[in-house]
Image (cartoon, grey):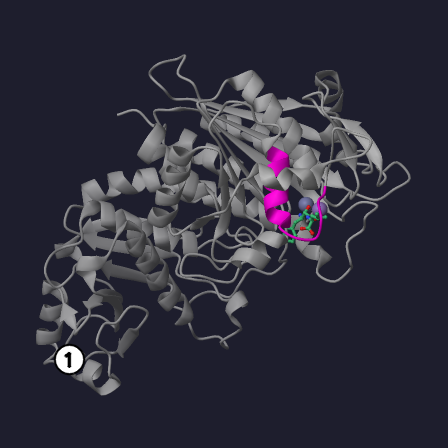
Amino acid sequence: MPITVDISFTSLEKAQGETLVALAEAKFGLGTRAQALDKAGDGQLKRAAKAAGFKGATKSALDLLAPHGLDCDRILLVGAGDVSALGRNDWVLLGGRIYGELKRRRIAEATVILETKSAPVEPDAAAAVALGAQLRAYRFDEFKSQAPKSGDGDDEAGEDGAKKGPGKLRFAVKEPGKAEKCFAEETHVAAGVGLARDLVNAPANALGPVEFADRLASLAEHGLDVDVLDEKALGKLGMGALLGVAQGSARPARVVVMRWNGSAKKRAKPICFVGKGVVFDTGGISLKPAKGMEDMKGDMAGAAAVAGVMRALAGRKAPVNAVGIVGLVENMPSSKAQRPGDIVRSLAGKTIEVLNTDAEGRLVLADLLWHAEDSFKPQAMINLATLTGAIMVALGKEHAGLFSNDDELAAGLMAAGQATGERLWRMPLDAAYDRELDSKTADMRNIGGPYGGTIIAAQFLKRFVREVPWAHLDVAGTAMASASSDVSESWGSGFGVRLLDQLVRDVYQER
Ligand code: BES
Ligand code: MN
Ligand code: ZN
């Protein structure tokens, strides 16, 4: 159950409640209503702010308890910084911070006055604030046998993880009807992010390829056409590279195709999203070291993001045709597992010498990319994969790696990254790296030398792309094992869902 906060909108006139939240701009700028509260309480807000040195800077907050002469119990001022400079994503982050401040104080319910010093917050910005709160409110407690403590504040303050955030937020805005309408779109994005996080956070014993495919099949209820291909179908197609990865596991592979046909032009070429879905990556016979291996339950984060964005597009009935395809396998060592040195035949007909069974993501994607371009004739194709540890060496956890054969597609993705805060950094593709992939006995091998591993992996994928504008996002550093942020306290971040939804809005959807 990803969404844990009930959100509603009301008018500024009806901004009442036990706990009131108001924004404070830099240099302690208050909106009309907060100023009125200050006045009615004989200047308590101003005095408290002065005493605390609170000026309204971003990431600061001031809590005024039991204000004298006012009919609320608490006023929480949240710093909004320089409001004139806030972009859409800054509003989202502000919403996340408001939720976080309430959670920290174990407040169960609040009314948030969305007004700045100079004006009420516009409906789309208000919806963005609500989205931020919703994203931050995500919890993964499916496997906790005890529910987290309630937000009443009387019980012993537990550690953060055991705390429950506010269950109810009311946003007081200028035009509640309009804000609600904007927010209705955003809830589908939040649901998509929630789905992606749920899938990434799920332990691999609970989420094998079959269970994953079943979860995706149930997305039909949101209007997606979902096809599940089993091993027999994949063998018939000739996906030898993908099946080679799966063959060591007792749990059979699946490929799932999700289609959303929202375009008014039925035959409009789709945009295609492709996801690496290794439900667990032990490395196979080229076994990974034990330390940290548990993180490899998240090696399906690319597939999870594809599912999430498809869920978002269908939910908000985006006027676009889109296809999502994911390859679901488990990379295990066993007596049936593929060995280093084995040669597999990919769907493209090219043979691959598997020198390291831990470079498995590219084998899965090779067949998916070839199949996607062939079958769906997309106008653009974007794959997401937790593909290399090397991308983290290069970019850390702040940017995902972007590789593309098309500058326009790359520019669109970069812009969407800026707009959503899911940031990308473009990396090179260059034929000069290709010699690393030469094999003595097959058309290519699946690993190169010790340097430039993330680029070599991208060069490998490129061999399975023909004409189509294509981008590869290496999300190994950004989609899993994530640090908390203003909009996420989750291990699986859901990275990619908001990014691709934004790209569709900016570039691909009709209107
Ligand atoms: N799934 C891993 C990449 C990864 C590592 C993702 C750490 C997230 C965190 C991938 O399948 C892998 O094992 N890549 C190898 C490639 C190497 C064998 C050429 C790597 O990065 O070490
Ligand atoms: Mn691997
Ligand atoms: Zn992997």
Name the magenta segment's main secondary structure.
helix
Q: Position of residue 263 (x, y in %)?
A: 36, 19
Residue drawn at (55%, 56%), measured in percent from left and top? Answer: 394
Q: Position of residue 413 (x, y in %)?
A: 40, 40
Q: Position of residue 210 (x, y in %)?
A: 69, 33
Q: Position of residue 268 (x, y in %)?
A: 39, 16
Q: Which residues are magenta?
A: 447-461
Type of the residue with mark 1: Lys
Q: Is residue 300 visible?
A: no
Residue drawn at (26%, 25%), measured in percent from left and top? Answer: 511
Q: Which residue is mark 1?
A: 46
Which of the pair 508/488 is nearer the observer?
508
Taking the magenta stretch, the answer to whether it contains residue 129 is no
Q: Quick check: 188 above or below 392?
A: above
Question: Taking 211 as reference, is 393 left or right?
Answer: left
Question: Taking 495 as reference, is 256 left or right?
Answer: right
Residue drawn at (43%, 18%), measured in percent from left and top? Answer: 269
Which element type, helix, strand or loop, lies under badge 1? Answer: helix
Q: Quick check: 59 above or below 84?
A: below
Q: Quick check: 302 above or below 325?
A: below
